[in-house]
Image: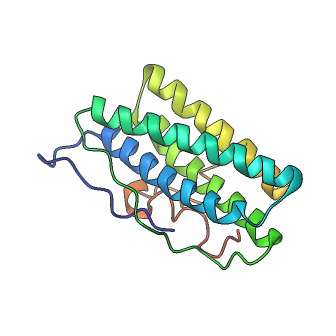
Amino acid sequence: MSTRSIRRSDDDSDSPELTAVQAALAAEHAAVYGYGVLGGRLDGKQGAEARSAHDAHRARRDALARIARDLGGRPVASNAAYALPFAVSDGRAAVRLAAVLEDRIAGAYADLVRATGGERRKDAAGALREAAVRSARWRGGNVAFPGLAERAAGADPAATGPVEAAGADGTR
């Protein structure tokens, strides 16, 4: 799922904070779409967890859109559809996609933590933590630095993008 179509504001002079907010918003759009796809493949406890995650991502998406406007930007719009990194034909694939989505969201929020300060930084760190916890639940284990483990040392986050941080095939 690519979020490369991040629109810049009309004056094309976005701050690093607004750029990171827009990237996190684009990642949240992709996560909302992805959970919509995978939710239909899960039932019981996993289905309930998927619905809860879907609701959480929708709430974060809406909050990020407000923040983008507060920073003087035009919130990046959702794509009509996203290319999934692999086919989601059963519950196992749905769980795997959920873990990938959370890893990618963690990467976007790690960038936002770095780009912002104060209360927004605290909120971004909370969102990073939530994504890391959900990823660990879906995966059945965790990574040392969620959202950062996939990035090469010294890599420019704008060059790699938050959604491409995890492997396209969902593996590590």
Image side of residue 34 versus residue 116, left or right: right
Q: Quadrant of residue 171?
A: bottom right
Residue 81 appears in view: yes
Residue 112: where, in percent of width, then height?
45, 39
Of residue 132 and residue 56, the one placed in the foreground of this image is 56
Residue 32: where, in percent of width, then height?
56, 54
Residue 142 appears in view: no
Image side of residue 31 versus residue 6, left or right: right
Point out the residue furthest to the left here. 11
Image side of residue 92 versus residue 117, left or right: right
Q: How is the image coloured?
A: rainbow
Image side of residue 12 versus residue 4, left or right: left
* Quadrant in which the C terminus appears: bottom right
The residue depicted at 31 percent of the width and 39 percent of the height is: 18
Of residue 34 and residue 24, the one placed in the foreground of this image is 34
The residue depicted at 65 percent of the width and 53 percent of the height is: 102
Residue 59: where, in percent of width, then height?
54, 37
Of residue 158 and residue 136, the one placed in the foreground of this image is 136
The residue depicted at 25 percent of the width and 39 percent of the height is: 15
Q: Quadrant of residue 68?
A: top left
Identify whether 131 is placed above or below 119. Answer: below
Of residue 144 and residue 124, the one placed in the foreground of this image is 124
Residue 157: where, in percent of width, then height?
43, 55
Identify whether 56 is placed above or below 78. Answer: above
